[in-house]
Amino acid sequence: MTSSVKRKLASSNGDNSKKGPGHWSQALLTSMEDPELKIDEDEKCVSIKDKYPKAKYHFLVLPREKISNLKSLKSEHVGLLKHLQLKGEELAEKADDNLLFRYGYHAVPSMGQLHLHVISQDFNSPCLKTKKHWNSFTTEYFIDSSKIIKQLEKHDMVEINTADSESLLKKDLKCHVCQKQFTTLPALKSHISLHIVTRHKNT
DNA sequence: GTTCTAGAAC
DNA sequence: GTTCTAGAAC
């Protein structure tokens, strides 16, 4: 049997198409248990350091309750989401009470288990490498926690258009502070290192 | 989500 | 020639 036939049989078996435990998309569930990453926990949630931080400070706050994504949310989760945001604000305050942070969710996250991003707005990190990284935190692909909570209170659900959201990741690179456009990520990264993004004013 | 790397872009 | 992006990963 040729190797190409073996490959076809392997894929048709479907044994590499399932996303069970151990698949990369479930990595957050194991990161929640990693003492190296865990920075805080209580009865409702666990907070960890993002393994590949996209800014000086980048934390994730995850509910202990298994919630796969934004589409699973109902108004009954409003209390929990407010708790996650409050935890995130505490972490940010403790990390640096002068830096500006945002608290929000990716519209279409790559990894399972709902996770609130707590990220400082300097975006100065060697782990921020691609246009997708940039646009996922600086376009409407990043949805503020407060906006999610308001949608749940008003409509008992969160409306996400997957195709529209993913198209946001393809948008041209633009500075989140002064809106200047760039053609390459290295040029943009060099530019933003000159901005100091504090809670009180941007320069 | 990341790693790797071919080849596009400069 | 080097930098940079974008798609496959069995």
Image (cartoon, coloured by chain):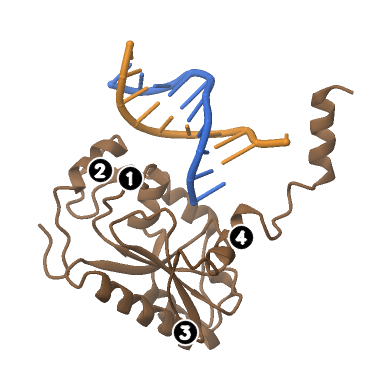
Chain colours: A brown, B blue, C orange
- First in sequence, mark 3 or 1: give its number: 3
Decide: few, some or many residues near mark 4? Use Cα within 10 Å; few <14, some 14-19, many ≥20. some
Name the residue at 20% across, 66% down: A99
Q: Are marks 4 and 2 in contact (CB under 8 Å)?
A: no
Residue A190 picture location, percent across and down: 21, 41
Determine whether the residue tagged by mark 1 lies in a helix, strand or loop. loop
Alpha carbons under labels 4 and 2: distance apart: 30 Å
Q: Are marks 3 and 2 in contact (CB under 8 Å)?
A: no
Would you place residue A113 above or below residue C3 in this image? below
Residue A105 picture location, percent across and down: 43, 66
Q: Which chain does the residue under circle 4 lie in?
A: A
Query: Quarter holding the N terminus of chain A?
Result: top right
- First in sequence, mark 1 or 2: give its number: 1
Q: Amino acid at mark 1?
A: Pro
- First in sequence, mark 4 or 2: give its number: 4
Front of the two marks 1 and 2: 1
Q: Which mark is residue A126?
A: 1
Q: Amino acid at mark 3?
A: Asp
Residue A146 figure quarter: bottom left
Are callouts 3 and 2 both on one chain? yes
Decide: few, some or many residues near mark 2? Use Cα within 10 Å; few <14, some 14-19, many ≥20. many
Q: Which chain does the residue under circle 3 lie in?
A: A
Q: Are marks 3 and 4 in contact (CB under 8 Å)?
A: no
Determine whether the residue tagged by mark 3 lies in a helix, strand or loop. loop
